Amino acid sequence: MLSNLASDIVSAETGDIDWYYPVGLVVLLQTALFLFCQVVKDNSHIDVMWSLTFIAPNLLIMYAQHSQGMEIGVRSLVTNACITVWGLRLAIHIGVRHTGEDYRYIHMRKRMMKAGIVVYYVLAFLLIFMLQAALSLIVNCATLFVTASDAGAAANIYPLVWSDYLGWTLFWIGLIMEAFSDRQLATHIANQDPNKGKFCKIGFWRYSRHPNYFGDALLWWGLFLVACSLPNGYIYFSSPLVMTLLLRYVSGVALLERKQSKHPEFA
C-alpha cells in the first residue's frame, strides 16, 4: 500500500510530483487541527502547527522519492535538515509558552461568533486554518521546489554552487538570530529586577526592536537563494517575500507595534 502511495506521489521515470498529495497533507493536518481546536476551544494551537506544516510535505516527497529508489541530492538533504531544525525549534518554543488562547484568536472568535455558531465554524475554518495552510504552502514553495527537483538524475546534474553555500549561511545566521533573540527575551521577562525596564535591551535587542522577526525573514531569503541554484528557481521569490510581508505588516511587527505603542519606552 505504501509503495503504491509512493508511486502515486512521484514518478520514478520522470521524477514528476503529483502535488495533490503534499498539498492535501497540509490541508488534512490543518483540518484535523481545526477539529481539535474546536473541542478544546483554543484556536491558538495553530501557531504550533504553523512550522510543522513546512516539514511534513517535504518529508512526504522525500519518502516517496526514496521508496521509488531515487537518489536524494545533498542540496535537498541539507535544505530539509535546515527546515526541520527551524520548524521543530519554533514549534517547541511556541508550544512550551502556551498557557491558553492568544488574545488575537480571542478577538477573532468574538467577532465571528456575532453571526452565530455555524458561521463562526465556517469562518474559523476558512479564515484561520485554511488561510494558514495556503500561506504555509506559498512560503514553503522554494523549499518544496528544491526537494522535488534535487533527486534522481537531477541530483547529479546540478552540483552545489556558490548560491547554495551563501543561502545556507544566511539561513543559519537568521536562525541563530531568531533563536538567541527568543532566548534573550525570555531571560528579560524572567528577570525580577524592577529596574530592568519594560522592554528587552540585551543581546540582539540592543540593535533591533524585532530581531527575532528579522532573523526569521533572513533565513527564508537564504533558502530562496538555494532554490536559485536550480533552473528557474528564481520564480519562487514569493516564498521569502510573503514571509517578510507577513512578519512586517500582518502577524509580527505590526501587531506588537500597535500593542505596545502607548508605552513611552517603546517610542
Image: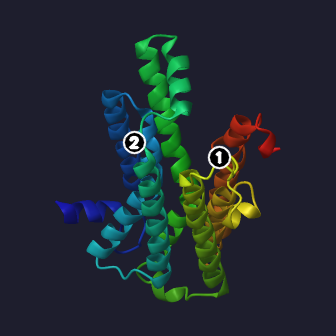
Q: Which amino acid does label 2 sit on?
A: Gln
Q: In which quarter of the image is the N terminus?
A: bottom left
Is residue 176 left or right of 4 when viewed as pictured?
Answer: right
The alpha-carbon separation of the residues under discs 1 and 2 comes to 21 Å
Is residue 116 left or right of 185 when viewed as pictured?
Answer: left
- Residue extending furthest right? 267
Q: Disc 1 marks which residue?
A: 252
Is residue 48 left or right of 218 when viewed as pictured?
Answer: left
Q: Residues within 10 Å of mark 1 (few under 14, many from 20)?
A: some
The tag earlier along the polypeptide, 1 or 2, is 2
How many marks are shown on the rendered structure? Answer: 2
- The residue drawn where x is 63% and y is 43% is 251
Query: Residue 133: x and y, percent?
Result: 48, 44
Query: Residue 56: x and y, percent?
Result: 38, 58
> What sort of colour scheme is used for the picture?
rainbow
Q: Disc 2 marks which residue?
A: 30
Query: Residue 235: x and y, percent?
Result: 67, 63
Is residue 26 left or right of 206 when viewed as pictured?
Answer: left
Q: Quadrant of residue 249?
A: top right
- Residue extending furthest front? 194
**Residue 231 visible in the current orientation:** no
Q: Quadrant of the C terminus?
A: top right
Q: How crowded is mark 2: few (under 14 residues within 10 Å), some or many (20 or more)?
A: many
Q: Which amino acid does label 1 sit on?
A: Gly
- The residue drawn where x is 40% and y is 80% is 72
Q: Which mark is residue 185?
A: none
**Residue 125 visible in the current orientation:** yes
Q: In which quarter of the image is residue 10?
A: bottom left
